[in-house]
Amino acid sequence: MKVLVVGGGGREHALCYKIAKSSKVDKIYCAPGNAGISEIAECVPIGAMEFDKLADFAKENEISLTVVGMDDPLVGGIVDAFEAEGLRVFGPRKNAAILEGSKAFSKDLMKKYNIPTASYEKFSSAEDALSYLETADMPIVLKADGLALGKGVLICNTREEAMEGVKTLMLDKQFGDAGNTIVIEEFMTGREVSVLSFVDGKTIKIMTSAQDHKRAKDGDMGLNTGGMGTFSPSPFYTEEVDVFCKKYIYQATVDAMKAEGRPFQGIIFFGLMLTEKGPRVLEYNARFGDPETQVVLPRMKNDIVEVFEACIDGTLDTIDLQFEDNAAVCVVLASDGYPEKYEKGFPVLGLERFRDKDDYFVFHAGTKLSDGIPVTNGGRVLGVTATGQDLKEARAKAYKATEWIDFKNKYMRHDIGKAIDEA
Ligand code: AMP
Ligand code: GLY
């Protein structure tokens, strides 16, 4: 069969790599893709938000399955658009992708169905938000309701900062309409864990855990980014945590969406915080995480296309989801200056060192071909991933492999997975 993947980052490269391993797949297309993806898929120059063009392409090329990696098209209704044309597509419909698309919706859902999360209030008027902040406890967290490239969350230590934050989100509209409504929530502390899951509307199957490193600089300093590195599994995701989440969070979320008339088919990504009072949901995403996918999929044993099909057909209960008993670490190589200002267009050298190795991967996040040569084309350029028997071995191998790659302004964190030493 032919598969179309929508997106063009490290997550989609990891998806293409895993889909290419499926015995069911003859050919992969990726829109728009990137230089690395072009080695395993035919890249198609159509943007992820061009639903009509994508659907036409899928029809003309007899695509049997489309897999959507990114949040914007899902929240915008790409699945509905494909289904309306009779096309098979993996991902939540618009009315379910709202789980990620609106923080106010997801917080209200958790409250209504007693799913553990930070306590919160929501506001559609800056005046009301400011007045609430006059007596609220600090630190406090402000969240733009809508999608804001992962940047719409402000952690405020002081009342002044929080008031300033309300102005930034609601009056200056730094994230546009995403800030028309905001959620103001309790500040929590604890370790963060990312748990991805497959969902078919009623059944949920949990993948192995992972941990992201969101800040730009070592020691979790610097600005929030899309993610500077990941490891999997998280040693902090213990049996006890798993039992709690299975009882109060995972199935409860799927059942809640079904009860609301918004059955969720696709990936639910649970952003969890392991607080002293137990696990709490920080956020939901309606898609694979990036770079979490780059450490989770290389460890997955199943044929992923079979799992996608089971989600679409509502037969996920028949799938025995399995992961290798190993570990993986991904170190993101970025352009110096990311997530603010950075230069691009520099040749990327050393990629051939990853060929024909089963335990080393280089997933392209922001690259493109220029006269046939891969050049940097984004803030996050590559995800260098290695698997190993355990996290320590995987980390040592991943860092060794970062040395194989060279490009101008190469930047990375040096402490990805350091938390492992504390486990
Ligand atoms: P989100 O996009 O909701 O995952 O938020 C981005 C990051 O902000 C999270 O990964 C956390 O590090 C932090 N964060 C979000 N909500 C809270 C909270 N209630 N308490 C503490 N930190 C938070
Ligand atoms: N790594 C976090 C995310 O994909 O949102």
Image (cartoon, helix red, strand yellow):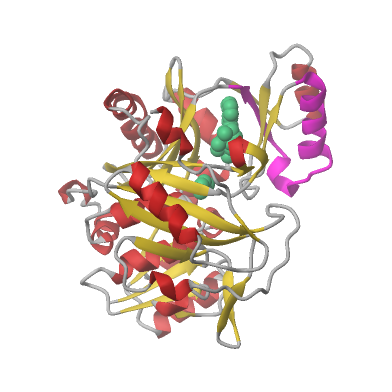
Residue 381, position as x, y percentages in the image: 57, 63
Q: Is residue 83 left or right of residue 332?
A: left
Residue 157, position as x, y percentages in the image: 72, 22
Residue 255, position as x, y percentages in the image: 34, 34
The answer to whether any part of residue 358 appears in the image is yes
Quadrant of ligand 1 in image: top right
At a point 56% along the width and 46% down the height, the residue shown is 101
At a point 36% along the width and 62% down the height, the residue shown is 360
Q: Quadrant of residue 337?
A: bottom right
Q: Quadrant of residue 277?
A: top left
In depth, the one of 215 and 311 nearer the eye is 215
In depth, the one of 263 and 190 nearer the eye is 190
In depth, the one of 341 and 89 nearer the eye is 341
Q: Quadrant of residue 221?
A: top right
At a point 68% along the width and 45% down the height, the residue shown is 178
Q: Which quadrant does the C terminus fall into?
A: top left
At a point 28% along the width and 60% down the height, the residue shown is 304
Residue 188, position as x, y percentages in the image: 56, 22
Vertical relation: 93 (above or below) 172: below
Examine the structure image and report whether residue 46 is included in the region drawn in magenta: no
- State the extent of the magenta-drawn residues as a range: 158-187
Q: Is residue 4 left or right of residue 199?
A: right
Examine the structure image and report whether residue 167 is included in the region drawn in magenta: yes
How many callouts does the rendering have?
0
Vertical relation: 209 (above or below) 375: above
